[in-house]
Amino acid sequence: MNFTLNNVPERTSKPRQTGFTMAMDKGLSVREVEDFIETCGDFVDIVKLGWATSFVTPTLKEKLAVYKVAGIPTYFGGTLFEAFVIRNQFDDYRKVLDKYDMSFAEVSDGSIELAHDLKCEYVRKLSEQVTVLSEVGSKDAEKIIPPYKWIQLMQAELDAGAWKVIGEARESGNVGLFRSSGEVREGLVEEILTKIPFEKIIWEAPQKAQQVFFIKLLGANVNLGNIAPNEIIPLETIRLGLRGDTFMHFLNQK
């Protein structure tokens, strides 16, 4: 930090298990990635190449190399996994992970119907090859999953070998954990937390109000995802109580 302030929350250090920030790359150029890392690299733990953008990114290898040199792992969005699976190309997907030297993968079923036993089998198989992030929740705003089911799905996917589970919200933050307005389904979140350890969950929270909610609920070192590159430093100030939304929240805490 550039100067000293008292009563600022202590942040975990990289490599982190909690206080994890997952950034969403929706098509940055190599030069933009270099600038992004220069400014935000210390605050980013992993980068998701959103949905299937990796399929059309012309400088994919070069971009991944820049992230790798900076020590920031990357992974392809779960929609790419689903695109391979629905075409019966799971083995091809595994070859793609090897080709691009990926150490993480996301397993999701937000856009396709996938029997949960089969999804867990994909988690098991991929966990032999890479570290698996498993996303729970639907991208369909009309599909409401009851809290007990979220808990069952998350626990089963962790048991199958997922390193962490991701609470679905899309890049817009208006499905899954959130209502169409972006409002947090607070009862759902609180019930999930009665059974699933908070350090095992990455909450997709692209909107500022959503980030503030989780930081006030679970502290500066909550795991948050789907953060836009230009929102990484603003998020860090929210985590540290240095933005109006959390300014008083940490001030009197030891």
Image (tube, grey):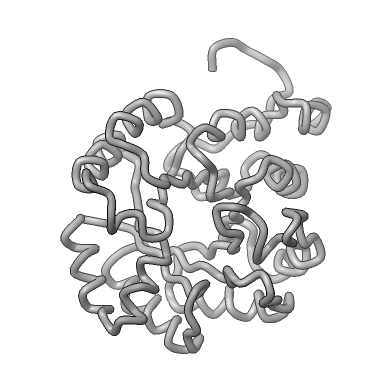
Residue 165: x and y in percent read 53, 65
Residue 227 occupies quadrant: top right
Residue 51 sits in quarter: bottom left
Residue positioned 62% across, 12% down in the render: 4
Looking at the picture, tell me which residue is in the foreground, 159 or 81. Answer: 81
**Residue shown at 77% from the left, 32% from the top:** 246
Q: Position of residue 153 (x, y in %)?
A: 58, 78
15 over 189 or under it: above or below: above
- Image quarter in which the C terminus is found: top right
Q: Tell me which corner region of the image, top left, top right, bottom left or bottom right, holds residue 221.
A: top right
Pick the front one: 112 or 7: 112
Compared with residue 144, is residue 59 higher up or lower down, i.e. above or below? above
Furthest residue in direction top, as rendered: 3
Q: Residue at x 24, y 63 (%)?
A: 97
In the displayed structure, 233 sits above or below 23; it is above
Q: Is residue 164 left or right of residue 102?
A: right
At 34% from the left and 50% from the top, the residue drawn is 74
Residue 166: image x %, image y %? 54, 62
The location of residue 86, given as percent across then percent down, is 36, 81
Quadrant showing the N terminus: top right
Give the side of residue 109 with respect to residue 104, left or right: right
| Number of disc labels | 0
The image shows residue 202, relative to residue 145, as above or below, that is: above
**Can you see residue 137?**
no
Q: Is residue 202 visible?
A: yes
